[in-house]
Image: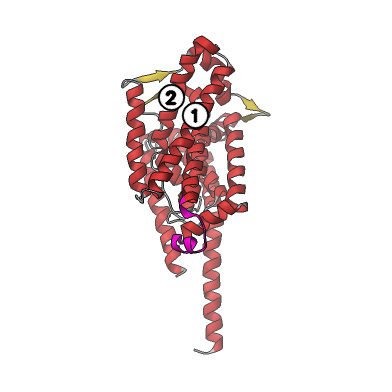
Amino acid sequence: MNDPELAVTANSRARSRLLDLDLKLYGPLLALVALFILGAIINPAFLSPANLANILTRSAFIGIIAVGATFVITSGGLDLSVGSMAAFIAGVMIIVMNALVGTLGAGWATIFVGIAVSVALGVSAGLINGLVTTRGKIEAFIVTLGTMGIYRSLVTYLADGGTLSLNFSVRSVYRPVYYDSVLGIPIPVLVFAVVAVIGYVILNRTRFGRHCFAIGSNENVARYSAIHVDNLKTLAYVVQGLCVSIATIIYVPRLGSASSSTGVLWELEAIAAVIIGGTVLKGGYGRIGGTVIGAIILTMIGNILNLTDAISNYLNGTVQGVIIIVAVLLQRGSWRRNR
């Protein structure tokens, strides 16, 4: 092969890589814009300020959890327990706050204790997932599948098969955390934004973030590079647990209750948001900004289904499942082209 042919081949490969990069960077954003236009066409009510605020607020729960999932997936892990974990944390929060009303009263002192309990439980649950996965040398899929069942069973037991309800007086004080806004921006959206910014800085501007990329790319090479792989992977699960606790803190005042059905399919939505956003499922590449867009896309899909009779809203889970499969197939095709 002569030099001109080599140059043509090199240019072709460069254009292919550039196209893949552009799709990773801008694909989720283009999909979000397309959905926005579709929603506006289907129903003019989609563009109402109340509806758009509702989309952003509802995306905050899954978005915050998905930020934590980005760290886990980027480092080569997976957590299927986040929905059940959220239900368990919410249940314990409600029990603790109800028990403290008699001593601390139905005010912020009781709520702050409940928040502290949420953070402690989230961090502990993430630590357990991480330690069993890394120290026990068990696949993350198996570990988190097991803890998913454990947490779901525990909240069902605590609720005696029914529903745990927050004291009405406490809920009245706690309610603004979900329903109020600051400068016209709903509080859950502000919390989501803060978590996303912090997550972006940690993943892209710190040694921990760089090591997550390295571990996800090649765990063995990371070990040879003197990276403490087990400790860092465990820390990624701790970050996930902390994000679940934060999401639960702003979720509890919304309904003021917890049951065995709380958080169902949240793990599917969190993983879908991460994958849609461009994070590679096999690890080694993650994007917090893409995850944020992915969470909004999922919520927007559900919202659009509610506004149209063309497709039943009960098929929302089907749409999400299809999106995950298609996104992974596109990632695999891109990876094979770059080999």
User: Is label 1 in contact with label 2 (beta carbons under 8 Å)?
Assistant: yes
Whether residue 79 sits left or right of residue 235 in the image: it is left
Res. 322 mark: none
For mark 1, give the secondary structure: helix
Q: Residues within 10 Å of mark 1 (few under 14, many from 20)?
A: many
Q: Is residue 167 above or below residue 268?
A: above
Q: Which amino acid type corresponds to the residue marked 1 in the rendered image?
A: Ser
- Queried whether the magenta region covers residue 226, the answer comes back as yes
Mark 1 or 2, nearer chain start: 2
Question: Looking at the magenta stretch, what is its main secondary structure?
Answer: helix
Q: Is residue 261 left or right of residue 10?
A: left
Task: Say few, some or many: other residues with alpha carbon within 10 Å of mark 2 (under 14 / 14 to 19 / 20 or more).
Answer: many
Instruction: Report which residue position mark 2 lands on.
Output: 92
Provide residue 183's location: percent of width, then percent of height.
68, 29
Mark 1 = which residue?
118
Q: Residue at x 49, y 18 (%)?
A: 97
Q: Position of residue 40 (x, y in %)?
A: 54, 39
**Whole-number angstrom distance, CA of label 1 to CA of label 2:** 8 Å
What residue do we see at 54% from left, 45% from top? 293
